Image (spheres, rainbow, N blue to C red):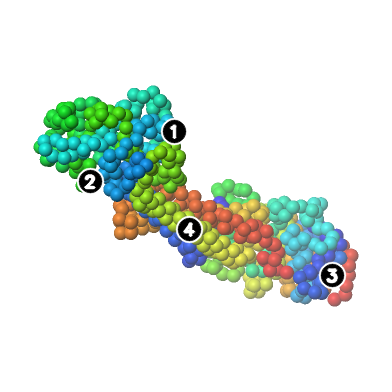
Amino acid sequence: MRLRKLVWKELFERKSQVITGLLAILLGITVIVAIKNITFYSEKAVAQELDALGANILILPKSATLENYYSADMQGEEFPEEYVERLTQSNLQGVDNLSPKLSVPVEVQGRRFTFTGILPKSEFQAKAAWQVAGISSRPQGCGTVVNLPGLTPDQPKETLVRTRVIETLNSTEALVGADVASSLGLQTNDPVTVMGKTFTVAAVLPQTGTVDDSRIFANLHTVQQLAGKGNVCNVIEIVGCCDQISKGLVSKINGLLPEAKVVTITQVVDTQIKTNRMMSNLSMVFLAVIVLVGGAGIANYMYGNVQERRREIGTLMALGAGSRFVLGMFLLKALILGLAGGLAGYVLGTVLAVILGPKLAGVVVLPMPTLILWAVGLSVFITVVASYFPALRAARLDPCATLQEV
Amino acid sequence: MLKMEAVTKTYNHRRPAIDVLSDVSLEITQGDFVSIVGPSGSGKSTLLLMLGGMLSPSAGRVEIDGQSIYDLAPDQRAALRGRKIGFVFQTFSLVPYLSALENVQMPLLLAGFDEQDQKKRAVRLLERFGLGDRLEHKPCELSVGQQQRVALARMLANDPGVILADEPTGSLDPETSAQVVGFLDQMNQDGRTVVMVTHDPGVASRAKRTLKLYDGRISHGGTMNSISVQNETPM
């Protein structure tokens, strides 16, 4: 016989008590695994949705208004393109994509459109200073879609709609919005003449339902040249990391560009921040409740178990069991309970998350194997810590008193 | 050899303090068979538990083979019990969720024997006590007499030199009592020291010597060659 067999047999001797004792920890782990699982997929879904919205920070001339977010760059005011350089040379964290624009109204074949100059990434890299401090060297992430030059293959130019940045756009290429293409009957590789210069349509952008559908995009420097306005922009669009925005990215940009107006779509950013924070807080609350309730439940069960087994402990001591053996006996039991509670809690929590996730959060939830370690680790930690003092009490029992022989 | 020198045990749980044992000194030589008799509350079980290293005295010294038991740390005392002392209890104190075989294996587990040796020795002992066909039975599935025999087999597992039996026949019918005392007698003949607390004069008479306790003090009865009585109080 071994110690673990002794513990195992005792567990099966008092099955109903074990189940009762385990219930609090099992339910706790189940709930927290379910929350963590749903939270993970929910945050992912929110991040993807926000990512699809594109830029969330705009840098505009000081006097510009933001009545229409999508046409904020069409108010006829400009600022120096040098602002872009200032941003890229700063060490600001959380600026994932950065797109300066200059928009001018144009007439093509008797129809009015907006001619917008954009700066492709290839031109950022052409400038030595930007290579060092440019966006490509910044930490990336936040769920936004980012292309790392040299590391990821070029994406189709249609992704401009979503990422706000494209890899390359030479001086004779143009991208046309869906309405422009349909009005002028344009397709990819067709020529189109704007402000006296003929461009080749590099891509027709998908329908967005915004003013972008009525835009013709060309290289920023070409538009600047054709408009005769020098190196200026109307707007710099930034896809900022929501976490960094919450940590004051907007005010940091304001500090860097005091002459400009920096605005963010607070509702969009707040939605993600609030969702993430709520889920995180909820998890923490449950974690605290589980540690307290689960720990108290296990400690109570263990104290009861020690009390019930006083005579048995006394007998074992009379047979030669030392305090370490008795301590080990109860801690091993706690370990087994913790493993069982953690594993069962993981399975139940995952099933709960997969079933309830689509109903509660509207997201598809898949099992997360990494949560097994987390669930088992937490469960074992709670059971062992909560059992330590009852186990110590057992190990320090007076064998004589427990046998009630006096 | 078991030795007590001027041992006193005082309980202070309630006022006034009570001396359960008062200045008791005795010597029990190797191979002796001593019965301890006396009225309830006279201190018999206290004396037995003290000899077994289970209850420390308030004053005085208890020795086994020249080693002062209560100068040892609690875990060292537990190890000493495992090596040298076998206990038999009135209520058998078997672990209820273990089979007869596993109960007998317990002291061997505590002594660090591997599983195979534990099993081999436990089976041999249970067969010796006529329980070869009850190996997998739990205590609740055994008769009272069978339970006491399992307890005796468990007590012998580590081959102790000293056997301390507290009312070993207290829960048994006369026939089973005689059988159990016969086993104790046989163990004594094997060279083990047996100290037995009992209320039953018939059982006590089976011992070589009888030690009488009254109000925590030793009186004498029978032939006390091996017991030096230094505190005599008439019963």
Between discs 4 and 1, the one toward the N terminus: 1
Label 2 or label 4, whichever lies nearer to me, is 2
Q: Where is residue A5 in the image (x, y as percent from the top left)?
A: 53, 54
Q: Which of marks 1 and 3 is in front?
A: 1
What's under tag 4, amino acid-wise?
A: Val
Looking at the rendered structure, whether the residues under marks 2 and 4 are on a common chain is answered as yes
| Residue type, label 1 | Ser
Q: Where is residue A215 in the image (x, y as percent from the top left)?
A: 20, 39
Q: Give the Cα distance between marks 4 and 1.
A: 39 Å
| Labels 3, 4: one chain | no
Question: Where residue B190 appears, x then y in whole percent?
Answer: 71, 56
Q: Which residue is drawn at 11% across and 36% down?
A: A109
Tell me the kind of residue under disc 2: Thr
Q: Which residue bears the numbered disc 4?
A: A285
Residue A37, given in percent of the width and then of the height, sits at 38, 52
Residue at which label 1 appears: A90
Q: What residue type is labelled 3?
A: Arg
Q: Which residue is drawn at 64% across and 72% down?
A: B172
Q: Which chain carries label 1?
A: A
Q: Distance between the residues labelled 2 and 4?
A: 42 Å
Give the number of the disc on residue B217: 3
A94 left or right, relative to A219: right
Is residue B103 shown above or below A128? Answer: below
